[in-house]
């Protein structure tokens, strides 16, 4: 008998319970599939009534006789918008169908075609409808292939809120036209004695749906509202003589749609001006594609958060695009995922793609029995459902913004942002209501660009450090340190943050020119710059040229010619105004170069060797004879560039005075290499801490100049100097103490300035 290991790792000859496990898994899968089917069926039976309203609105501009065509087109949109993405995948299952904004855009297009066409409208209307929806699907596919899904999601919230609220108001106005039995808003001025009864009917139906939703939220309002509306309409027509509540929907006598490729007159196609058709549908198609993609991406993000999954933008938009191409060819309305359908399906256990397929099949069954039902649905009940739907899609964020503005919440900056948000929202909403949704979408895109530019056209100067407070890590003679304290305002280190483009670049130019009134050396630190466009690179060139005219030197820090930012600047020819020797990998190195240049310009404290009469901080207070005596106790060391003076953990057996050249103190870093801690200039003393503490070296000392000359004072020589010439040793120790105190004061001042600046 074959042995296997049980759950505790022990060998056993018992037969493992794999068959039972397989049975359990099989039952679980079957139960899950049953839940998916149940979820799809429940969504179809509970929400199909809303498709009737969408279909009626979509073809309302063509007249009452086209209601059947709209209903069939809406059902086809739900079927195709759910079925085709189910085979493409790319995200969690989605339930597609007509959506409010897209339906209104489609209706506006049909109204425009019917009203302005000089050609045969019976031919041009299905052509325009098919071209618009199919083109929208193609644009969606292009969005996915080009990876534009992320960009679409960056639409500002005020723009989306204004568009959503504009859609809601437009739906209410469309519903009022149905209630008043009017073709346009001008007919509202004509009073009809039946209007009070119709308004009362709509109010009763709305109250019923609101009450039912509060009492039984799991029962969807669309189906119950439709049933209650039909019953209420029949009762009022029977019990109240003489009242007229409007017509019923026309009976659905045929399932053959009067749109799509089957409705085209092939013999008349050559007579159509296809260029004119394309011009007519391009804007609505782009609006439909943007809205369809945005709704799909928003719903996919919500599903990712709820299910801890991750969708594929490209595949998802590909599936949605193919679905809309099929919708256009077959004469359906534009389709997009519905969040309410997603929630209802998930509540009923439908969280797999088989739920979408079951929904599509159920919608087909409902459509097949629709001829027996459509003649019993009152138009006024459809209008009431449209109003309820519109009230449910009003953006709650807009309500919160208005309430916060009304209550004067927050500080002045917060209230200014509130006013800006509300203004943008009202502009988009007004255009949606007064003109059309395509114009509102175009305005929203334009406002998005304006808001983006405004948001990023702020100062990118995060902080400005002047040389009197912020020093480099270079150790200098005390005379140079005091000079930099008094004249350091002539050096400005500017930390930048954010994107550098045409908007922020102009502001940066103004701020740099203001600094140039006092500073003669300006360093721009690019460490926190995210992006630079061609306009930003050109602005740098203009800044450098203007500063050069004012005899101000500009340097760039945290940037290299080989990096992405550096290459862009070089390609814009900005390096002609900013020489490459003014490009630095580190802002500290750039700051040190500015300090060196400022000291060189002043020509103070020259430490060039003139025999042995060198002015050194370590020898302050000694006369020539004492200096000569001191030199007898030292050794001269000469190093070339890259030579190591001492390494970390070497014995601390000597201290050094730098006569010429430069020394860098470095520490090793992980992965190899080293990092500079400080740099030493001629005239400074170093290495004294190790000799005083008797500890090994804590870092490496490397020469970084072509010729570096030092004086070495060994530990035993220092003790001998102390015994034989205590006055010279005392002066040396006093000077060492002065240098240490100066370094401590400088570090304290730099730390205090950094803390104060961080709070600003």
Image: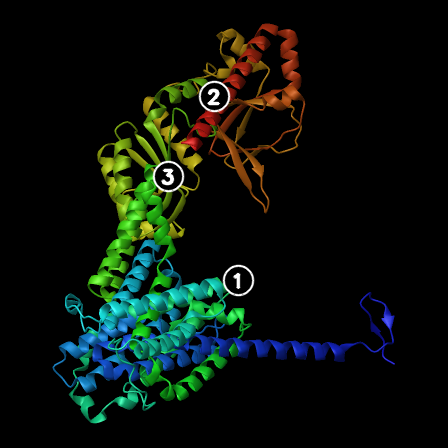
N-terminal-most mark, 2 or 1? 1
- Residues at marks 2 and 1, CA–CA distance in whole angstroms: 67 Å
Q: Secondary structure at mark 2?
A: loop
Estimate the x, y position of residue 749 in percent, counting from the top left. 46, 23
Residue closest to the far left:
118
Q: Quadrant of the C terminus?
A: top left
User: In the displayed structure, would residue 481 be above or below residue 492?
Assistant: above
Left-right relation of 634 to 361: right
Is disc 1 surrounded by few (<14), some (14 to 19) or many (20+) residues within 10 Å?
Answer: few
Q: Residue at x 27, y 49 (%)?
A: 502
**Front residue (pair 572, 145):** 145
Left or right placement of residue 511 versus residue 483 in this view? left
- Residue at 30% x, 71% y: name it: 383
Tell me the quarter of the image containing the N terminus: bottom right
Location of mark 1 (residue)? 306
307 in relation to 685, above or below: below
- List the residue tagged with mark 2: 683
Q: Residues within 10 Å of mark 2 (few under 14, many from 20)?
A: many
Query: Whole-Å distance between the Cαs marked 3 and 1?
Result: 32 Å
The image quarter containing residue 444 is bottom left
Q: Which residue is mark 3?
A: 410
Residue extending farthest to the bottom is 267
How many badges with numbers are in the image? Answer: 3
Tag 2 and tag 1, C-beta contact below 8 Å? no
Quick one: label 3 or label 1, which is nearer the N terminus?
Answer: 1
- Label for residue 620? none
What colouring style does the render use?
rainbow
Along the viewing direction, whichever of 611 and 557 lies nearer the viewer: 557
């Amino acid at each position: 008998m074959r042995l296997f290991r049980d759950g505790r790792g022990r060998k056993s000859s018992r037969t493992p319970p794999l068959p039972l496990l397989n049975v359990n898994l099989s039952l679980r899968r079957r139960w899950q599939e049953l839940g998916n089917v149940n979820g799809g069926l429940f969504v179809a039976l509970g929400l199909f009534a809303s498709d009737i309203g969408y279909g009626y609105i979509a073809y309302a501009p063509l007249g009452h006789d086209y209601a059947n065509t709209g209903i069939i087109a809406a059902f086809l949109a739900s079927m195709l918008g759910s079925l085709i993405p189910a085979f493409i995948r790319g995200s969690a299952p989605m339930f597609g169908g007509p959506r409010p904004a897209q339906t209104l855009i489609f209706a506006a297009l049909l109204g425009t075609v019917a009203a302005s066409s000089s050609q045969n409208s019976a031919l041009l209307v299905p052509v325009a409808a098919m071209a618009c929806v199919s083109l929208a699907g193609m644009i969606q596919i292009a969005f996915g292939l080009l990876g534009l899904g992320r960009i679409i999601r960056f639409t500002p919230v005020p723009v989306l809120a204004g568009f959503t609220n504009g859609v809601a108001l437009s739906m209410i106005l469309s519903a009022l036209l149905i209630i008043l039995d009017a073709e346009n808003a001008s007919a509202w001025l004509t009073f009809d004695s039946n209007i009070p009864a119709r308004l009362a009917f709509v109010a009763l139906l709305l109250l019923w749906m609101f009450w039912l939703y509060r009492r039984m939220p799991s029962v969807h309002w669309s189906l119950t509202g439709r049933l209650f509306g039909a019953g209420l309409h029949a009762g009022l027509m029977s019990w109240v003589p003489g009242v007229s509540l409007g017509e019923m929907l026309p009976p659905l006598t045929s399932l053959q749609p009067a749109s799509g490729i089957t409705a085209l007159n092939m013999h008349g196609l050559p007579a159509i001006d296809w260029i004119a058709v394309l011009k007519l549908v391009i804007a609505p198609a782009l609006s439909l594609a943007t809205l369809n993609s945005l709704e799909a991406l928003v719903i996919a993000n919500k599903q990712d958060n709820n299910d801890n999954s991750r969708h594929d933008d490209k595949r998802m938009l590909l599936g949605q695009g193919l679905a809309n191409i099929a919708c256009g060819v077959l004469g359906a309305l534009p389709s997009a995922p519905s969040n309410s359908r997603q929630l209802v399906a998930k509540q009923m256990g439908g969280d797999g793609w088989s739920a979408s397929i079951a929904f599509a099949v159920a919608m087909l069954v409902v459509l097949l029995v629709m001829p027996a039902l459509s003649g019993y649905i009152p138009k006024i009940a459809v209008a009431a459902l449209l109003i309820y739907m519109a009230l449910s899609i009003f953006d709650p964020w807009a309500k919160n913004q208005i309430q916060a503005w009304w209550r004067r919440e927050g500080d002045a900056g917060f209230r200014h942002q509130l006013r800006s948000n509300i203004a943008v929202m009202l502009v988009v909403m007004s255009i949606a209501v007064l003109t059309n949704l395509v114009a509102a979408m175009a305005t929203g895109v334009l406002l998005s660009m304006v808001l983006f530019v405004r948001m990023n056209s702020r100062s990118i100067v995060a902080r400005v450090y002047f040389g009197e407070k912020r020093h480099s890590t270079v150790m200098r003679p005390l005379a140079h340190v005091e000079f930099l304290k008094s004249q350091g305002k002539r050096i400005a280190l500017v930390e930048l943050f954010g994107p550098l483009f045409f908007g922020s670049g102009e502001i940066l130019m103004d701020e740099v020119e203001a600094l140039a009134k006092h500073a003669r050396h300006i360093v721009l630190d690019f460490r926190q710059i995210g992006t630079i466009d061609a306009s930003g690179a050109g602005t740098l060139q203009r800044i450098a040229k203007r500063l050069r005219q004012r005899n101000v030197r500009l340097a760039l820090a945290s940037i290299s010619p080989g990096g992405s930012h550096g290459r862009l600047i070089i390609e814009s020819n900005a390096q002609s105004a900013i020489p490459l020797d003014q490009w630095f990998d580190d802002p500290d190195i750039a700051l040190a170069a500015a300090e060196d240049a400022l000291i060189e310009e002043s020509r103070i404290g020259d430490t060039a060797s003139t025999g042995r009469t060198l002015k050194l901080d370590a020898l302050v207070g000694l006369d020539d004879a004492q200096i000569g005596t001191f030199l007898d106790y030292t050794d001269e060391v000469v190093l070339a560039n890259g030579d190591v003076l001492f390494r970390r953990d070497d014995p601390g057996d000597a201290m050094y005075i730098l006569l010429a050249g430069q020394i860098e103190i470095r520490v090793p870093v992980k992965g190899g290499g080293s990092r500079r801690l400080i740099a030493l200039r001629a005239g400074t003393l170093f290495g004294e801490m190790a000799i005083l503490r008797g500890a090994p070296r804590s870092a490496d000392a490397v020469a970084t100049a072509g010729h570096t000359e030092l004086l070495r004072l060994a530990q035993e020589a220092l003790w001998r100097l102390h015994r034989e010439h205590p006055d010279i040793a005392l002066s040396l120790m006093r000077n060492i103490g002065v240098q240490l105190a100066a370094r401590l004061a400088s570090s304290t001042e730099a730390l205090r300035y950094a803390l104060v600046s961080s709070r600003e």
